[in-house]
Amino acid sequence: MNVQVVVIGAGIAGLCAAYRLKEKGVSVLVLEAEKQVGGKIQSAHLEGFTFDIGPNTVLASNEAVVRLINDLELSSKVLWANSAANARYILKKKKLIALKVSPALLFTPLLSLPAKLRLFREMYIAPSTVRETVAEFVSRRFGKEVLDYLINPFLAGTYGAKPEHIAADEAFKTLTQWEKAYGSIIKGAWHTLRQQRASKKSSRQMFSFAGGFYDVIVQLAERLAPTLWCDAHVQTLVRQNGHLQLSLTYAGNPQLIETKKVIVATPAPDAARLIKPIAPTLAAALEKVPYSPVAQVFLGYDAEQVQVPDAFGFLVPEVEKRKILGAVFNSKIFPERYAEKLAITVFIGGSRQPELAQLPEEELIALACAELADILGIKVQPKVAITAQWCAAIPQYGLEHQNVRQAVEEYEQRYGDIFFTGNWREGISVPDTIEHAEKIAGQVAASLRHETLARESAH
């Protein structure tokens, strides 16, 4: 079999890249090792409950994700988050405290008076001359309490990470840019706020669909069929006579595929194993990308039996020494989905307590219920309880990550036949992943056009 491009991996990155290539008239084949597409984006439907496995919400934060939704003709089916989702809580001493942003931050009980007074010093602290972890950056500019009660839980909820493991200019790129441009984050925030008010720029909104974001996966898969193979296991990838050759099994049967380009859209460790025979140096770089393990526990209740705040959910600072990272109140965010039901997703593990993410399902459910009983006073047993566990859930963008990114870019530019995309490239969010997949699809299509023109001019 001969196609122009083979995409390895049918998560959101691989599907999006393949879809954009097909739009451009490029023949493409997508290979997925699992029997179901979507990667870490899945949905579970049980007894009238819809649970989002993987990301619970998506932000309309860039043009790429909005464009994809429109192109898939899904815009009329979007569920926008309820306004209650703007409220978020942080746990402190067994109490949920509403998270307030500046200037209300000065009145929050999350911070002590000395910590609040410490905030004013930020405008007079010189910018750093070296790259820092989030822990170093925030401690230096705002002090330890801000790190412990604001930033630590935020990173646990987004990256499943500890601040010591993430680079500041990766997780908080805007803040580090403000420090460089204005000498202060507070000054940068104030300047930006004035610009936004002047331009009346709208805020980014969270959204999903009736069946979860997996509805997008389904639409992409339908448009790529029948050139989307699940249960396809690639054994080798080699260069042969000016082409790339893949040997694999598809539904147990051996296959040999010849192609001009390959897009590897798998997690970094899987990409490393695949390319190690032909690119050992790059594989060694990809092997260094760490991932945090995370378990999700999905709990469903009758709404009349359980009361939770009208909010997105709550996060747990590490200093509180609890056994969960936080919880999302799914039915408060998208009430249209749940009628008289209450759905909660509890997150466990991360870099903070990786061993907990590997517990058996029944122990995870018991742990989640015990923590919610202590924190929220929920004593009734859930009607529905299921789990999802990821040994390697979220890539960790540490101080060395820019070296990985540079190594991949140099390889792509040097050889021009194997490309890489995924949430380990330019951001962990779904919109960032979609944007990069679209970018890679454009690069591959341009490379194919250039090679065609070169051959034609040679004749």
Image: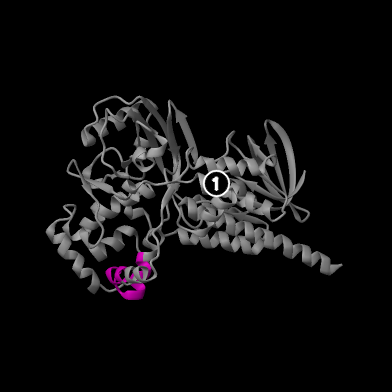
Residue 115 at x, y = what percent? Answer: 17, 60
Using the image, determine if residue 26 lies above or below residue 296. below
Using the image, determine if residue 401 lies above or below residue 229. below
The image quarter in which residue 455 lies: bottom right
The quadrant the C terminus occupies is: bottom right
Using the image, determine if residue 26 lies above or below residue 374. below
Dot 1: what SS?
loop
Residue 296 at x, y = what percent? Answer: 39, 36
Q: Main secondary structure of the magenta part?
A: helix
Q: Within the magenta stretch, is there residue 408? A: no
Residue 443 at x, y = what percent? Answer: 64, 61
Q: Nearer the viewer, residue 19 or 324?
A: 19
Q: Nearer the viewer, residue 298 or 247?
A: 298
Read off the residue under disc 1.
74
Give me the residue at 36% from left, 53% from top. Answer: 165
Q: Which residues are magenta?
A: 175-190
Residue sitting farthest toward the right: 459
* In this picture, residue 457 sits left or right of residue 161: right
Q: Within the magenta stretch, is there residue 180? A: yes
The quadrant the N terminus occupies is: top right
Residue sitting farthest toward the front: 76
Q: Amino acid at mark 1?
A: Leu
Give me the residue at 24% from left, 30% from top. Answer: 378
* In this picture, residue 435 sits left or right of residue 122: right
Q: Nearer the viewer, residue 99 or 166?
A: 99
